[in-house]
Amino acid sequence: MTDAAATSPPSRRTWSPRLVSLVFVTVVVAVLPLVFPSNYYLRVASLVWTSGLAVVGLNLLMGLAGQVSLGHAAFLGIGAYAVAIGPTHLGVPPIPSALAGIALSALVAWIVGKPIFRLKGYYLAVATLGFGLLLALVLTSESAWTGGPDGMPVERVELFGWRVTGALTWYWITGVALIIGVALALNLEASPTGRALRALHDSEVAASVVGVDAARLKLTAFVVAAVYAATSGALLALMNGFVTPDTASFMHSVEFVTMVVIGGMGSVVGALVGAAILVALPQALTVLQEYETAVLGLLIMVFMIFLRQGIVPGLIGLFRGMRR
């Protein structure tokens, strides 16, 4: 052994950012029930997890592929209404109905995405907006199947005679689903497909020159985002026991886009932070009564002014600058 090798310090094993993000999300989900004082907080956290699951999927489309969708809530509505229509009208149990709704969302995304993703920029955003408005109109008008504007009840899930109810039970179901979704999204980001999507985000022309099939990748990201949204919608409907057309509304789609932008596009943890802010913060601001909406809007403006890349990437950049 040479003197240099003998005196060199031992190498330190460093965790990849992907593993750090997954461990962070897992620890948060596992620890929160230990500090929450009541079931109300478990309920709010479950809503954060379901919204976060949909936003993680949308983040793959916006943050990686660089494509904007203003109709993302439509796929949430497909998943939600699948678990309501299946047992009520077709006699299919809730879990198979949820799986069928997820598959249907993927199929619809593939069919709709092929012509839509020939468009770019504002034209693409308007096309996805039109799809979302169309589905919301169908859910509202087809009252014989969907219950119309009043919505319809959702049959409770039963496993081996055990009825799945309770705030803590649904907290763990939605939390585990979120962890699985985050793990899959992080693996996709680190895969060759994820690197190709990043290249597509930076420059579609340059990515095409090096052999990236831009049309196929954009369609793939759209289908994956639809699967995430449909899974979130099915979980939300089963947890609430009721579903309304508001699930697929345009404003819900805007909320999803806002969550991605506030948290930080391209960041899985940022997507969850954005979901937590827009779901949990209004609950905390209820003490302000009629000023609640104004304060929430002001906070969003402050985030965008001082953290233009989003909360998580912006804070990481500030921390690295302080270390230098």
Image (cartoon, rainbow, N blue to C red):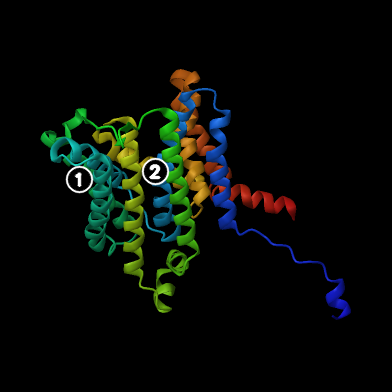
Identify the residue at image location x=31%, y=37%: 160
Q: Quadrant of residue 4?
A: bottom right
Image x and y of residue 206, in percent: 44, 74
Image x and y of residue 27, in percent: 57, 43
Q: Residue furthest bottom?
A: 2
Identify the residue at image location x=83%, y=71%: 8
Is 109 on the left or on the right of 32, as rendered? left
Q: Say which element carries label 1.
A: helix
Residue type at mark 2?
A: Phe
Q: Residue 281: tell me if it is visible.
A: yes
Mark 2 sits on what residue? 256
Residue type at mark 1?
A: Leu
Q: Which residue is more in the foreground, 307 or 84?
A: 84
Q: Which residue is more in the foreground, 213 or 118?
A: 213
Mark 1 sits on what residue? 134
Is 14 on the left or on the right of 71, as rendered? right
Crowdedness near tag 2: few (<14), some (14–19) or many (≥20) residues, C-alpha within 10 Å: many
Identify the residue at image location x=22%, y=40%: 93
Q: Which residue is more in the foreground, 247 or 99?
A: 99
Q: Quadrant of the C terminus?
A: bottom right
Q: Earlier in the sequence, mark 1 or mark 2?
A: 1
Q: Residue 249: tell me if it is visible.
A: no
Q: Are marks 1 and 2 in contact (CB under 8 Å)?
A: no
Q: Residue furthest left?
A: 144
Q: Say which element carries label 2.
A: helix
Image x and y of residue 264, in percent: 51, 49
Identify the residue at image location x=41%, y=34%: 170
Q: Quadrant of residue 168?
A: top left
Q: Is residue 10 above or below residue 80?
A: below
